[in-house]
Amino acid sequence: MAIFAGKGRGIIYVQGEQKQTVSEERMLEALLAECRELEARVARGDAKLTGAQVEVETPVPPPPRKEGVVGLNVVGGE
């Protein structure tokens, strides 16, 4: 699943097939709907997932900072 975005719109691809073009305001909503549809198709046996599996790992805490080093939290940007 992929979304290519630019110029105020996004093109959603599912399993290499272009599915729809949506406005910037609807990109996340439409992508989530496509994810749920693919999930339903896989559950029914109408589609298969192939390739690498996604594994979720517990995040490893960062190493301790050196004396005098201050970490910065990046919250967002323009």
Image: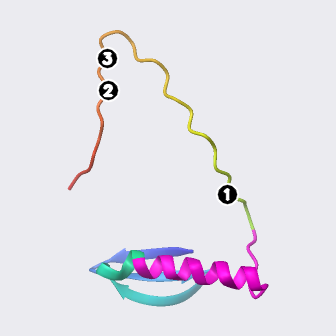
Residue 51: where, in percent of width, then height?
74, 66
Marks 1 and 2 sit apart, C-alpha to C-alpha, by 30 Å
Residue at image coords 49%, 76%: 32
Residue 16: where, in percent of width, then height?
61, 81
Q: Earlier in the sequence, mark 1 or mark 2?
A: 1
User: Disc 1 marks which residue?
Assistant: 54
User: Disc 2 marks which residue?
Assistant: 71
Q: Is residue 65 left or right of residue 45?
A: left
Q: Which residues are magenta?
A: 29-50
The image's colour scheme reads rainbow
Residue 46 colored in magenta in the image: yes
Q: Residues within 10 Å of mark 1 (few under 14, many from 20)?
A: few
Which of 71 and 32 lies nearest the eye of the viewer? 32
User: Disc 3 marks which residue?
Assistant: 69
Q: What amino acid does circle 1 point to?
A: Val
- Residue found farthest to the right: 45
> Could you say whether the residue bearing mark 2 is in a helix, strand or loop?
loop
Q: Is residue 27 left or right of residue 75?
A: right
Q: What amino acid does circle 2 point to?
A: Gly
Residue at image coords 48%, 82%: 12
Asked if 69 appears above or below 72 in the picture, the reply is: above
Q: What amino acid does circle 3 point to?
A: Val
Instruction: Quadrant for residue 67, please give it.
Output: top left
| Residue 67, visible in the rendered structure | yes
> Could you say whether the residue bearing mark 1 is in a helix, strand or loop?
loop
Name the chief secondary structure element in magenta. helix
Q: Is residue 18 left or right of residue 50?
A: left
Residue 49 colored in magenta in the image: yes
Marks 3 and 2 sit apart, C-alpha to C-alpha, by 7 Å
Disc 3 + disc 2, Cβ < 8 Å: yes
